[in-house]
Amino acid sequence: MLLFVSSAGVMAQPYNQNPTQTVCVGPQPYFVDVSPVPGVTYEWSVSAGGTITAGLGTPNITIDWTVPGGPYTVSVYTVAAGCIGNTVTVDVTVTDDPSATINYAGNPFCITAAPAAVTLTGSAGGTFTAAPPGLTIDPVTGTITPATSAPGAYVVSYDIAGTNFCSSFNTTTNVTITDAPSATIAYAGNPFCTTSAPVAVTLTGDAGGVFAAPAGLTIDPVTGTITPATSTAGLYTVTYTIAAAGGCAEFTTTFDVTITDAPAATIAYAGNPFCTTSAPVAVTLTGDAGGSFSAPAGLTIDPITGTITPATSTAGLYTVTYTIAAAGGCAEFTTTFDVTINQTPTTSPIWHN
């Protein structure tokens, strides 16, 4: 800041003729026009707030302002050959250089987060910018909008331009925007039989989560692979969880898995072999019901109950097959039992000669 004295009065560089001036703390230069009178000395004084550190007696001085406030008075008059010229003054208000800190509470932010206001401590009136491009930020208020920003790491700058002979100011803070986790899981081939091989999960989306299921289903918490052979038959909900991180809430997705017991059964016909005169014979079924019975042509058999009727059958050896259809991820099941039908002999009449 320069104080300039002319025939028009007190002026401050750059030629501000206002009788009041504003400067920042620190060294500031002042000057007056060189007097045309030979042998002139210049008598400077400062009322308070600063100290003249250079130029006493000359038309150019430096005042080191150290105490914000005022207004303080800067005065100068000339002395030549015992004659004292008029005194010229200017009132000076001293302000601090701009200073501030900024931060965003809650950083990092999920892309699903609401707009976040800046916490500004210190000098207001600056401008906010961010680098690299991708962060939505209000240049006046500093508010950021994660929902319209690209995920990434950013440096937010707060800049105050130099004014009133104050230095420009810059401060920064880091802001991170993270993508909200998203994923789906599936198990191809569901449902699964207890005889099935281990089944890998199909994960679409973000990895790094943890798999879990109710007791009874054998599942690897890291890979998500299930092992039907060591699981208990039943319906299970597999949950895939990504922990809260980067400002984003915990994420979960689920998939229902069914484990079915492999069918098992035995059949038998008590009293085998049978005569063609025998009464119908019921099957003894041990194990899973619901299957169907069959036999080669010649044996009369009920396909639902498995009962055989020797009286309407042809004598011979037959293999009865009990079949449970493929279902619930389990293959078709069959078991057999051999049945013999013997022809009952007939006796001719007794003759007498």
Image: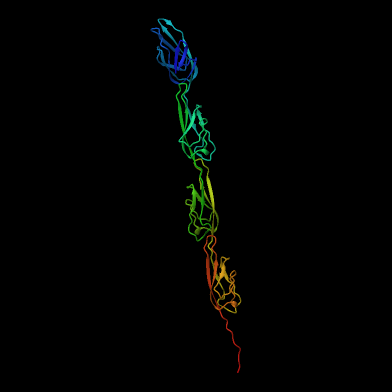
Q: In this view, does 87 lie to the left or right of 349?
A: left
Does residue 199 lie above or below 105 as drawn? below
Q: Is residue 71 or residue 351 the one in the foreground?
A: 351
Instruction: Give the image's coloring scheme.
Output: rainbow
Above or below for 53 versus 139: above
Q: Is residue 146 above or below residue 314?
A: above
- Please state if 67 lies on the left or on the right of 291 as rendered: left
The residue drawn where x is 53% and y is 49% is: 253
As drawn, which residue projects farthest toward the bottom?
Answer: 353
x then y, percent, for residue 194: 51, 60
Pick the quarter of the image with the N terminus: top left
Of residues 226 and 2, which is closer to you in this image? 2
Residue 270, x across and y down, in percent: 57, 74
The residue lying at 56 percent from left, 69 percent from top is 293
Q: x and y percent of residue 240 in the render?
A: 51, 49
Q: Determine the image quadrant of residue 299.
A: bottom right
Q: Is residue 187 above or below residue 242?
A: below
Q: In this view, which residue lies farthest toward the top? A: 82
Residue 186, percent from left and from top: 51, 53
Q: Quadrant of the C terminus?
A: bottom right
Numbered circles on residues, count: 0
Q: Which residue lies furthest to the left in this view?
A: 39
